């Protein structure tokens, strides 16, 4: 009987780590966003195609005060793309400097 319980524990641990891997920084602000992370990713990749290497939702001054920030890796380097979390507008689309934050 302990074998099935161990399997359940292992499955739960794997699931918990999988979910954490898909978490993004700033999730506590998601309730205030009008667009979700998937919509913001789509907008960011449309503005600058590549591979997203980092993503976060952050509070900032100006505009709506809440934005998604994406680091997008391309052949020419890393681009930072900011997406307004309430309107979906592109706020920033610039090359990442030598010391990305």
Image: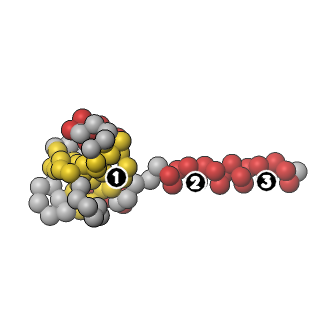
Label 1 crowd bin: few (<14), some (14–19), many (20+), radius 10 Å: many
Task: Give whichever of 23, 72 is nearer the camera.
Answer: 72
- Residue at 34% in and 52% down: 55
- Residue at 50% in and 52% down: 21
Q: CA distance from mark 2 to mark 3?
A: 17 Å
Task: Give whichever of 72, 5 is nearer the camera.
Answer: 72
Residue 98 shows which numbered tag?
none
Question: The C terminus appears in which quarter of the rendering?
Answer: bottom left
Residue 85 placed where, x, y %? 23, 49
First along the sequence among labels 1 and 3: 3
Which residue is tagged 1? 55
Quarter of the image where one finds residue 27: bottom left
Label 3 crowd bin: few (<14), some (14–19), many (20+), radius 10 Å: few
- Looking at the image, do the residues carrying marks 2 and 3 touch, with CB atoms under 8 Å apart? no
Residue 1 placed where, x, y %? 88, 51
First along the sequence among labels 1 and 2: 2
Quarter of the image where one finds residue 29: bottom left
Task: Give whichever of 67, 69 is nearer the camera.
Answer: 69
Farthest residue, direction left: 62
Quarter of the image where one finds residue 67: bottom left
Residue 43 placed where, x, y %? 24, 38
First along the sequence among labels 2 and 3: 3
Which residue is tagged 3? 6
- Residue at 35% in and 60% down: 26
Left or right: residue 33 versus residue 25 is left
Task: Give whichever of 7, 56 is nearer the camera.
Answer: 56
**SS at circle 1:** strand
- Residue at 77% in and 49% down: 7
Farthest residue, direction front: 76
Which residue is tagged 2? 17
- Note whether 19 is above or below 100 in the view shown: above
């Amino acid at each position: 009987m302990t074998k099935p319980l161990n399997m359940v524990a292992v499955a739960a641990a794997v699931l918990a780590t999988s979910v954490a891997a898909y978490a993004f920084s700033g999730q506590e602000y998601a309730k205030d966003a009008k667009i979700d992370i998937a919509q913001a990713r789509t907008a960011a990749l449309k503005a600058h195609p590549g591979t997203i290497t980092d993503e976060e939702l952050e509070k900032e001054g100006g505009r709506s005060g809440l934005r998604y920030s994406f680091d997008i890796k391309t052949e020419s380097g890393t681009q930072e793309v900011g997406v307004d979390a309430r309107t979906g507008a592109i706020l920033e689309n610039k090359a990442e400097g030598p010391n990305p934050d």
